């Protein structure tokens, strides 16, 4: 099983919807793939968060009876004669619409399966980065060290990482520093720095790399992601901020 095949089953695995063979195959892949394991961990945390904080409502006990009564109700015309509502016509139309909707869903799945291409390594990490950003906003773990002082944030990472992250204060440029935290991406612990732009939060992830890459941009599920390398470090910025302002943030970080 490769990463593309595994990604299609991760949600079902977290929800306990796979059969025994698929479950064993997924478990074997996750043991050997740190990237998919990290993504699966994110799904698991989200699953737990929804279960613990989600709101559930029970339908009234008489709802089913009332629905049946509505469907089987009769109408009376102005002369007082009872005329049967058209349950058969309604049922036939409903079935036809349901069948058409089901056919459309199947067609969409088939077309997606045919046209879908494998993710590149950068795209896989970009999806991880977005998942890390969303987790930080949902799980209340936005910062381990809340501070706008770069001289407070940077030393906090000493002894927690095997590298010293670059921390810039960009308040003068309209991107104030909020703090930092530890995270786990691309199969290793990384530094996550938090910045603000108006009402938008920016996560900037950093870790060492030997790769030299030109800046890349991604748009994933409504989030913009920018990736670049500089001075032996990989930088990934993600936010729901518009791509033009996120590009300004990257430019200021690269100075």
Image (cartoon, helix red, strand yellow):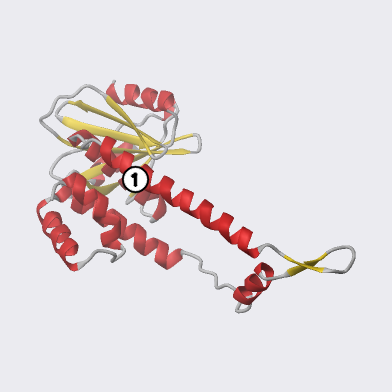
Depth check: give the residue in front, 55 or 24.
24
Residue 212 occupies quadrant: top left
Picture residue at 24% right of the left edge, 43% below the top: 191
Q: Residues within 10 Å of mark 1 (few under 14, many from 20)?
A: few
Question: Which residue is under mark 1?
Answer: 109
Q: Can I make out residue 243 in this image?
A: yes
**Above or below, 208 relative to 138:** above
Residue 186 occupies quadrant: top left
Secondary element at image label 1:
helix
Q: Position of residue 141 (x, y in %)?
A: 36, 54
Q: Can I make out residue 189 in this image?
A: no
Q: How many marks?
A: 1
Q: Quadrant of the C terminus?
A: top left
Q: Position of residue 78 (x, y in %)?
A: 89, 63
Q: Position of residue 219 (x, y in %)?
A: 36, 33
Q: Is residue 134 left or right of residue 3?
A: right
Depth check: give the residue in front, 222 or 190.
222
Depth check: give the residue in front, 160 or 90.
90
Picture residue at 63% right of the left edge, 76% below the top: 65
**Above or below, 202 relative to 248:** below
Q: Position of residue 166 (x, y in %)?
A: 24, 33
Picture residue at 68% right of the left edge, 69% below the top: 70
Q: Is residue 87 left or right of residue 14?
A: right
Q: Residue furthest right?
A: 79
Picture residue at 12% right of the left edge, 28% below the top: 211
**Above or below, 245 relative to 167:** above
């Amino acid at each position: 099983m490769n990463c593309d095949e595994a990604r299609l089953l991760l949600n079902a695995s977290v929800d306990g919807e796979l059969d025994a063979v698929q479950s064993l195959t997924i478990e074997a892949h996750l043991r050997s793939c740190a990237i998919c394991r990290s993504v699966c961990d994110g799904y698991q945390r989200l699953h737990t968060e929804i279960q613990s904080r989600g709101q559930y409502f029970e339908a009234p006990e008489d709802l089913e009876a009332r629905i049946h009564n509505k469907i089987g109700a009769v109408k009376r015309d102005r002369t007082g004669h009872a005329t049967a509502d058209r349950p058969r016509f309604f049922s036939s139309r409903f079935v036809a619409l349901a069948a058409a909707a089901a056919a459309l869903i199947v067609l969409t799945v088939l077309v997606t399966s045919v046209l879908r291409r494998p993710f590149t390594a950068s795209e896989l990490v970009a999806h991880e980065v977005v998942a890390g950003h969303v987790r930080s906003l949902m799980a209340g773990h936005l910062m381990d060290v809340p501070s706008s002082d770069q001289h407070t944030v940077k030393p906090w990472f000493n002894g927690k990482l095997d590298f010293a992250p670059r921390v810039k204060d960009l308040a003068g440029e309209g991107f104030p520093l909020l703090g930092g935290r530890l995270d786990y991406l691309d199969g290793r612990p990384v530094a996550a720095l938090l910045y603000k732009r108006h009402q938008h939060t920016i996560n900037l992830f950093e870790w060492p790399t030997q790769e030299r890459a030109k800046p890349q941009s991604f748009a994933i599920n409504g989030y913009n992601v920018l990736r670049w390398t500089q001075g032996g470090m990989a930088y990934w910025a993600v936010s729901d901020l518009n791509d033009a302002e996120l590009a300004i943030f990257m430019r200021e970080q690269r100075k």
